Image: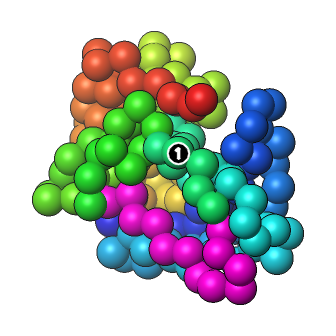
Amino acid sequence: MEEDSITVLLRNGLSPYAVIDQATVYSLANGSSIANFPGATSGIYNYIVVKHRNSIDTWSKTAMQFPNGQPLSYDFTDTNTKAYGNNLKLKGGEYCIYSGDVNQDGVIDIADISLIDNDVSFFLQGYVVTDLDGDYFVDSSDLAIVENNAFNFVSRMRP
């Protein structure tokens, strides 16, 4: 995994799940990051939502109570049951967020495949949304990722 920016949102535990606070952080190469949420009230139950530029938004399995003045640690990588709807993929011994939602509509489908296919044909390079594997080249490996996830009907799961 490459270091990259992600947005972590706290959403209210009750419908319509309003955004309580959010932080943009850099994930380290091991996928970990630290986010601070000064807007979070202790004792209130909130969902944690992870957003990335070309991945499916991933919600925590349940709303969690935030302890008074204490850090809360949440690890999506150790089991797929940490994500709402078990919406994680096992890769290299860790659970990962699904990649391929380049148009950020909540579903990996032909629209995402088309965007990546176009960029493959132009030999696009650099830090671009269609580079799913983080190697700074849009190529057949990125196309394989999005096609596999589209074939498996991967989509955002939320309460």
10 on left or right of 58: right
Asked if residue 68 lies in the magenta stretch, the reply is yes
Q: Residue at x 38, y 36 (%)?
A: 87
Q: Which x, y percent locates residue 40?
A: 79, 67
Which of 26/110 is in front?
26
Range shown magenta: 66-77
- Specify how the rendered protein is coloured: rainbow
Q: Is residue 123 visible?
A: no
Q: Look at the numbered disc 1 and give the secondary structure of its residue.
A: loop
Tag 1 residue: 62
Rate crowding at label 1 as few (under 14), some (14 to 19) or many (20 or more) other CA atoms within 10 Å.
Answer: some
- Main secondary structure of the magenta stretch: loop
Q: Residue at x 81, y 49 (%)?
A: 19
Which of 139/129 is in front?
129
Which of 68/127 is in front?
68
Q: Which x, y percent locates residue 92?
A: 14, 58
